[in-house]
Amino acid sequence: MSTVTKTQNPEADPRVKAVFDDIRATRKSDFINNMWLYLAFDPDLLEKTWAEVKAVMATPSALDPLVKEMLYIAVSVTNGCSYCAHSHTAAAKAKGMTNEQHADLMRVIALAAKTNQLAVALQVPVDTAFDADRQA
Amino acid sequence: MSTVTKTQNPEADPRVKAVFDDIRATRKSDFINNMWLYLAFDPDLLEKTWAEVKAVMATPSALDPLVKEMLYIAVSVTNGCSYCAHSHTAAAKAKGMTNEQHADLMRVIALAAKTNQLAVALQVPVDTAFDADRQA
Amino acid sequence: MSTVTKTQNPEADPRVKAVFDDIRATRKSDFINNMWLYLAFDPDLLEKTWAEVKAVMATPSALDPLVKEMLYIAVSVTNGCSYCAHSHTAAAKAKGMTNEQHADLMRVIALAAKTNQLAVALQVPVDTAFDADRQA
Amino acid sequence: MSTVTKTQNPEADPRVKAVFDDIRATRKSDFINNMWLYLAFDPDLLEKTWAEVKAVMATPSALDPLVKEMLYIAVSVTNGCSYCAHSHTAAAKAKGMTNEQHADLMRVIALAAKTNQLAVALQVPVDTAFDADRQA
Amino acid sequence: MSTVTKTQNPEADPRVKAVFDDIRATRKSDFINNMWLYLAFDPDLLEKTWAEVKAVMATPSALDPLVKEMLYIAVSVTNGCSYCAHSHTAAAKAKGMTNEQHADLMRVIALAAKTNQLAVALQVPVDTAFDADRQA
Amino acid sequence: MSTVTKTQNPEADPRVKAVFDDIRATRKSDFINNMWLYLAFDPDLLEKTWAEVKAVMATPSALDPLVKEMLYIAVSVTNGCSYCAHSHTAAAKAKGMTNEQHADLMRVIALAAKTNQLAVALQVPVDTAFDADRQA
């Protein structure tokens, strides 16, 4: 069940086909996952979302591709996004995340959620030492 | 303003002093940030929280220390914890996070929040290809 | 699966029947969706929840009924409520939301989630120009 | 206090100046709010964020500009973003939001948060009638 | 700073005065906290919000008043609401919450946030044994 | 579907077996729920998570066991954790939560979510009277 209807034969639309072709070429795989199939209900939204995902996640940058997948997992889990937890954990494994790294990722994001809760509950005042302008 | 009173002379309590001594030794710094000063209202909570933070964040593991700080930032920002965003960004910088890495971290966590929202809004069904048991 | 048992023959309770009758009359439809069927485990909770939903969502007010449904979707998606994303997207479509408006709604709530993340990550100080008392 | 240092004389960088010039032209105002001043720590992030905000929020589309601001407020409040609640409430007022509309917005987003909580707590199963493919 | 202007002399409006009088009578105190002073920008919103708070929090029910305050804190902290964390912690202390109970509350809500994160990250399937209909 | 593979014959690992034995002994039941079966992918994570759950939830402390379960529900629901809402509601019922208490819990956590939203939307300034140092 979803909130938009899944387009039948989405690649009949040339804008959708162009995005799907680029996804396949970028990932060197024929698999198009549901996120893109459902976003195809609006070709403009599909194009812009893929363009940003490609630019941030599939383009070399200051952070390692696996690190970026783990950061994506951290945000997705904290937001409670089931689809995203699944898709980005699969992506992280495809990029070489080991069981030990996966378990360590769990430890860090679980601990962060815990101490976030404590800091908010106690309303701990921010130390002036943490001000970026002071550190500069 | 906080929801617990800041203990006057917290190190008069030997359990608090032992934790603070360990924080100083672990970090090689005299600075005790507010999180620990306020947690001192309950020495048991202080001890256990520090023990876990030390085990996860200040002990060599499968993930790089800077990566762990960035994951901590990702969770803290998604949870909207102002104190934690400040303290862990300062920690990441102290561990060598460059401006380019910081900006890249921003790109990833902002994009993740955006696509989380889309996946939830469309209620995209999870692809069976993402099932860990299938991948095994 | 749910956390409360679904009442068998809920309209045997006259308070439940009165609420269900009002739901049917207000919506001009015989369909009672699961939210109300499960809330029937406590007639008082059912009555008060429906009364508020009716007063806010099914009574003419300063905002257009479709706008109110879209706002409901925005909050529900941000909270990750699967049931609510489904029920209010269906309601918005029933009130005339077009595909173009749906896609635009996606753009706005996805962008908002993204810039929320940036503002929190950078801990941007609130401009004094935004103070309501200054604007008055 | 923020987590990045505020750039001194940011418009010395021609990419930053071009963005700020476009913000001033688009809004017909000399005021540059802190969000953009702090994003200037990374000109690429500044450029891409402004381009998306301009495309979604300052370009005619299927939804009314004031409705888009209210949707932005709904997401920002649900995410607990203080900066965003302030900046988009000010923007909505500048676009003509009346006190009555503001109060109505409060009623809808507060009720949505409340019923989101009930639906999640009861784990209400999604009605098959809400499936978009059924409705098509 | 707030997003609505604080009404000057709010009790000049008889509906506001009636609510404030009832708050003072219910709490046996002259203190009106900011939540109510700011909600006074819309007397209807003020009346309905107070009526619900009074019915749920200040009326004997199946749960102890202090337990209800602690539940309120748990939700408010998880939502990152600074105002609410402050006001309900103060209320819980006024109703007799001891330091030991406060620390225990911290332990439970911090642990819950941590295991929530693990359950979502692992996408643990719900055991059929937890189905309310099976337990009935 | 989950993001880690469910270990076949997990008790072949003596560390896992020791934890499962302790769970069975503590709960006086042979049932091991999925949370622990999936956490078994990393015995260290399993051990530490169970140790903390046992210490906080299954050890007499300043708060009543049923109150602790209800607090756990409050956090889990606010975080949108489906697994946790199910498991802790079942646990609360096993510890004697009545239908009346369950409905009252719903009222409090739904109202808290609603007023959290209002306080954040209005950006209500924290009253200085709520400062813990002033109350001390």
Image (cartoon, coloured by chain):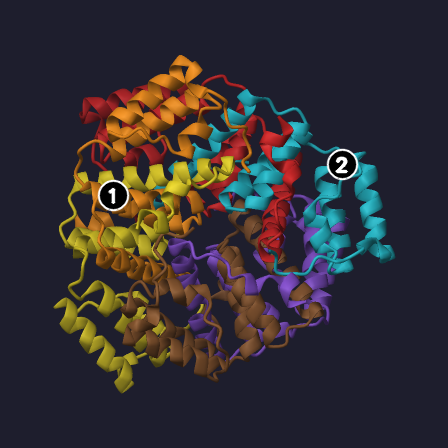
Chain colours: A cyan, B red, C brown, D purple, E yellow, F orange
Query: E127 and C109: which one is in front?
Result: E127
Left or right of F111 on screen, residue E22: left
Query: C76 and D19: which one is in front?
Result: C76
Residue, x 67% and y 35% (percent of image)?
Answer: B100
Q: Quadrant of residue B95?
A: top right
> In terms of secondary structure, where does tag 2 sit?
loop
Query: F127 and B133: which one is in front?
Result: B133
Against B2, residue C95 (above or below) is below
Residue B3 visible in the shown view: no
Chain ID, mark 2? A
Q: Label 2: which residue? A: A59
Give the x, y percent position of residue E107: 28, 37
| Residue type of the residue flagged with mark 1 | Ala
Give the x, y percent position of residue A21: 84, 45
Neighbor class of circle 2 (other Cα within 10 Å; few <14, some 14-19, many 20+) is few
Neighbor class of circle 1 (other Cα within 10 Å; few <14, some 14-19, many 20+) is few
Residue B46 visible in the shown view: yes
Left or right of C68 on screen, residue F74: left
Left or right of C29 on screen, residue D28: right
Give the x, y percent position of residue E45: 36, 76
Give a yes or no on whether discs 2 and 1 share a subunit: no
Chain ID, mark 1? F
Query: B83 and E67: which one is in front?
Result: E67
Against E49, residue A87 (above or below) is above
> Residue F94: which disc?
1
C-alpha gap between disc 2 and disc 1: 52 Å
Residue, x 78% and y 36% (percent of image)?
Answer: A27
| Residue type of the residue flagged with mark 2 | Thr
Residue, x 23% and y 49% (percent of image)?
Answer: F132
